[in-house]
């Protein structure tokens, strides 16, 4: 069984390295339907997995100066209380409905698996239509709202710390791609780290599962980065988005 966890981590790490898709949208369906992990436990494990895997990358972006710290702070001002509210909401549902909370989480993840691939497929076209805009006090307030929404979703599902924040940031900024990515990743480390602590307090983390996933994801990520220059990544990304859409519909149907 531990070998299967390593294999899943390797597969997800490879796909992340090749396509740049977030770990949450790729990993959660496999944990829930492939390894039959209860949805609430899967959310906690996924949050910790995302936190650990992004630490090294965030450090690289910080040292290269591709991070806008004020944007990170603005996002965190919203995402930290948002994450707390999301986890407390799950805790309340578990108190009311017991294991029925897993069905609610699966449906919430299903909706996100439908919305996020659609946004990703439209991202390229959307970016071309954006005008370059400088930050204002109003846009920073908007980023706090973005953080609040993202934090609530991450607290409930662990999905959205990267893809949703990135898409919504495009509404306010038009920085170079590497700056967008660096800023998003550093904020994601803060958000997923805080969310992991909250889920740890609720005993929603299986360290053996997370350890197996991480063991596999490290070489998988390296392989994916190597293959990304040798395979048609755009088409692979589109195929994965299609698979995620079908998976999301399957989760809602179930």
Image (tube, helix red, strand yellow):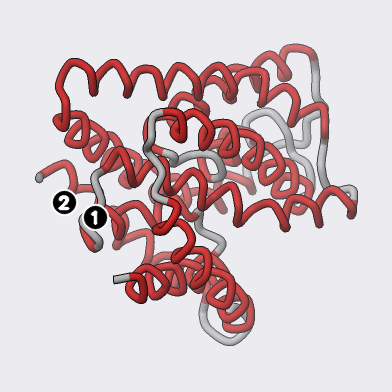
Residue at mark 1: 247
Q: Quadrant of residue 74?
A: top right
44 left or right, relative to 243? right
Measuring 78% from the left and 47% from the top, which residue is drawn there?
A: 179
As drawn, is 132 to the left or to the right of 102? right
Q: Nearer the viewer, residue 247 or 197?
A: 197
* Of residues 72 and 131, the one drawn nearer to the viewer in this rendering: 72
User: Which quarter of the rendering shows the N terminus?
Assistant: bottom left
Whether pointer 1 and pointer 2 mark residues with C-beta atoms closer than 8 Å, the reply is: yes
Residue placed at 44% from the left, 50% from the top?
Answer: 24
Image vertical order of residue 66 relative to residue 161, above or below: below
Q: Position of residue 173 (x, y in %)?
A: 73, 33
Q: Position of residue 26 (x, y in %)?
A: 40, 58
- In depth, the one of 46 and 121 nearer the eye is 46
- In the rendered structure, find residue 250 and report the number of the disc placed on it: 2
Residue 41 placed where, x, y %? 32, 42
């Amino acid at each position: 069984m531990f070998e299967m966890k390593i294999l899943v981590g390797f597969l997800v790490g490879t796909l992340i390295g090749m396509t740049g898709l977030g770990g949450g949208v790729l990993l959660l369906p496999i944990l829930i339907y492939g390894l039959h992990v209860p949805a609430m436990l899967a959310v906690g494990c996924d949050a910790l997995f995302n936190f650990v895997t992004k630490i090294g990358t965030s450090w690289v972006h910080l040292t290269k100066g591709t991070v806008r710290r004020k944007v990170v702070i603005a996002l965190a001002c919203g995402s930290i209380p948002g994450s707390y509210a999301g986890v407390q909401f799950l805790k309340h549902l578990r108190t009311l409905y017991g294991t029925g909370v897993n069905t609610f989480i699966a449906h919430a993840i299903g909706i996100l698996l439908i919305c996020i691939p659609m946004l990703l497929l439209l991202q390229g076209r959307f970016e071309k239509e954006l005008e370059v805009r400088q930050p204002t006090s109003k846009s920073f307030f908007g980023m706090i709202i973005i953080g609040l929404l993202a934090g609530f979703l991450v607290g409930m599902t662990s999905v959205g710390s990267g893809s949703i924040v990135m898409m919504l940031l495009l509404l306010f900024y038009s920085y170079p791609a590497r700056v967008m990515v660096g800023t998003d990743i550093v904020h994601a480390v803060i958000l997923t780290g805080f969310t992991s602590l909250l889920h740890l307090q609720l005993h929603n983390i299986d360290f053996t599962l997370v350890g197996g996933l991480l063991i596999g994801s490290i070489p998988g990520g390296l392989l994916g980065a190597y293959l990304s220059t040798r395979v048609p990544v755009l088409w692979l990304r589109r195929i994965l988005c299609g698979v995620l859409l079908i998976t999301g519909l399957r989760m809602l149907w179930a």
